[in-house]
Amino acid sequence: MAKTIAEINKRIKEGKAVVVTAEEIIDIARTKGITRAAQEVDVVTTGTFGVMCSSGAYLNIGHTKPRLKLGGGKAYLNDVLAYPGFAAADLFIGSNALPDDDPRNRIRPGEFNYGGGHVIEELVAGKDVRLSATAYGTDCYPRKKLDTWVNIKDLNQATLLNIRNAYQNYNVAVNLSDKLIYTYMGMLKPRLGNATYSSAGQLSPLLKDPYYRTIGIGTRIFLGGGIGYVAWHGTQHNPDVLRGDNGVPKRGAGTLAVIGDLKQMSPHWLVGTSMLGYGCSLGVGIGVPIPVLDEEVLRHAAATDGEIFAAVVDYSDAYPKMKPDILGEVSYAELKSGTIKVQGKNVPTASLSSYSRAVEISGILKGWIQKGDFLLTESVAPLPGVDSEVTFKPLNERPVEY
C-alpha cells in the first residue's frame, strides 16, 4: 500500500505517525518483514556527523558609517581570509580558509590550528569575531578601512551554505608505501598499518535512499542543530557508479548541497577541525527524514552495515595519481569490527565520522517529528539519478601557451 507525504504529514500533525531511526528499522524489518513494516512505519530518520569540506557560510555585516564597499577589497575574520567579492556588505567564509601567516606545510606536517571552520564554530557559539577589511573607496562608498568586532546576533543574515556534504559512501583509506603520510582521511601508517573510513554506514542518509526517491531539492533536514534544506545536488554528485544488488553504491556517489540559518545552529553540531598535514575543515551534523512511501523505500532504509560495501584505496599512490585501482571491497560491518583484511594482512580500522553522534542526530530528528515540530516536505525536483548526465569528471587539463 503506497503512502504520500501529505498523508504522512497529516499523521504527524495528529500525533499518530510512527517514526523510527534507521538503526531501529533494521530490527523491525527483520522481525515483522518488509511488507508489514512498510505498512506500520511512516518515517525513518537518518544521521551523520563528520568532517565535511566544501562547507562555508555567507554573512551580511550591514553597512558601515560612512559606507565601505567590501567587494573588490580584502576581508578577514579572526585573521582568516574571507571572500568579499559579492557586494558592499556581503562576505563568504569557507571551512578550508586559512590566515595569511599560517605556515601551512612548510614544515611538515603542518598543524593547521585555526581556519574557516573554527571561525564558523565561534560565530555559532555567539563569540565576538574580529572583522578587518580594506577597500579602494568610491564616491558612494568612501571608507577604505574597517577594524571591528562582529557577533552573529548583530548580523543581518548568517547562512550556512555547504556545496558538498553527506557523501553517499566513500573510500576506505590505506597506505602501501614505506613512509607515514598525512591526508584528509587522517594519518595513514606505512605498509598497511591502519585503515580509515568516513561514513555512518547504516545510518547515513543517502545510503538509506540509494536512488534518491525521497531526498530531493527542497527536502527539509536537520542541519547543524537547526533546520535546513537540500538546495541542489552537491558538487561531484555522481550517481552512475558501481552498485550492489541492493542498489547501494559501492563507490563515492551522490552528494548534497545544503543551506540553513546559521543563527539556529549549535557549536555541538558545527565543529572546526584541524587535519594534521592537510588543513582545516568543519565537522557537520546532518539528519534526513525518509518518508516510507512503499515497500521499496522501506527495503532500502532497512539495509544493514553488512550489506553496504566500500572500496579500499591506497592513498600513497592510487588516490593522489588518480589511478582507478582498488585493493578490494569491505562491508561497514567489517570496518566497525575494528579490523579488515587487505592483501592478506589484518589491518586495524578507525572512523573519521562519529557513529554515536549520528545516532544522536537521528534520535533528535525522530523526536522533532513525533512532537509535530518538524513536517516533511515534497521535493520540488529530484536529485539527478542513475543514467543522468550529471557525472564527476576530472579536470581536462589543457596547456596554456604564452
Image (tube, helix red, strand yellow):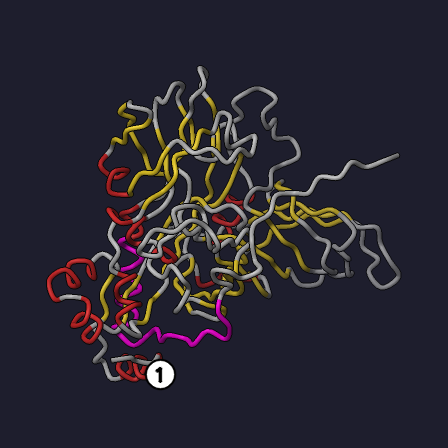
Q: Quadrant of residue 32?
A: bottom left
Q: What stretch is highlighted in magenta?
A: 359-382
Q: Residue furthest left?
A: 31
- In which quadrant is the C terminus drawn? top right
Q: Position of residue 9 (x, y in %)?
A: 32, 80
Question: Is 167 covered by the magenta stretch?
Answer: no
Q: Where is residue 217 in the image (x, y as percent from the top left)?
A: 50, 69
* Closer-to-camera residue (391/281): 391
Q: Which residue is drawn at 21% across and 73% down?
A: 18
- In which quadrant is the N terminus drawn? bottom left
* Closer-to-camera residue (154/172): 172
Question: Is 379 covered by the magenta stretch?
Answer: yes
Disc 1 crowd rating (10 Å Cα; few below 14, some 14-19, many 20+) is few
Does residue 283 sit above or below 277 in this rendering?
below
* Closer-to-camera residue (114/282): 282
Three-letter amino acid code at the position of disc 1: Ala
Is 340 on the left or on the right of 81, as rendered?
A: left
Q: In which quarter of the image is residue 336?
A: top left
Q: How many labels does the image show?
A: 1
Q: Residue at x 33, y 59 (%)?
A: 208
Is 207 on the left or on the right of 282, as rendered?
A: left
**Residue identified by numbered label 1:** 6
Q: Which residue is drawn at 65% across and 43% down?
A: 395
Q: Position of residue 69 (x, y in %)?
A: 77, 57
